[in-house]
Image (spheres, rainbow, N blue to C red):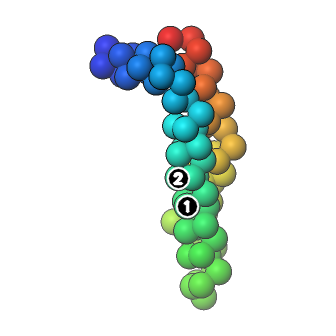
Amino acid sequence: MDELIEVADVLVDGGLEGIVAALIRLVGLVALLAGVGLWLLTDTGLLVAPAALIACGLFTLLIAPGLFVAALEVV
């Protein structure tokens, strides 16, 4: 846990929290597109894997960067 706090301090000192938040959004976008692609390109309907990818992608795209920046401000 101490190593994670040290990494967060380095990110805040370097002003890189915006870059990391953008990378988190990029991962969310990839997960969202993968889920939508699985759902639309397979003829089995909406299954658990595409639905989970879509939900995780939306969470990572919309909520996770804000939580990350808030956590960096607390540290």
Instruction: Kindly identify which numbered label has been placed on residue 17.
Output: none
Camera-nearest residue between 44 and 60: 60
**Residue 57 shows in the view:** yes
Residue drawn at (53%, 45%) of the image? 23
Q: Are there few (<14), some (14-19), or many (20+) residues within 10 Å of tag 1? A: some
The correct choice, above or below, for 55 with respect to 8 in the image is: below
Q: Secondary structure at mark 1?
A: helix
Location of the N terminus (image quadrant): top left
- Label 1 belongs to which residue? 30
Name the residue carrying label 2.
Answer: 27
Q: Position of residue 56 (x, y in %)?
A: 58, 51
Q: Up-down: is 47 above or below 73?
A: below
Tell me the kind of residue under disc 1. Answer: Val
Residue 61 is situated, as x and y percent measured from the top left of the image, at 64, 48
Residue at 37% from the left image edge and 22% from the top image edge: 7
In the current view of this chain or complex, which residue is farthest to the bottom? 43
7 in relation to 66, above or below: above
Name the residue nearer the viewer: 67 or 73: 73
Question: Number of labelled discs?
Answer: 2
State if disc 2 and disc 1 touch (CB < 8 Å): yes
Outermost residue on the top side: it is 74
Helix, strand, or loop for circle 2? helix
Disc 2 marks a residue whose amino acid type is Val
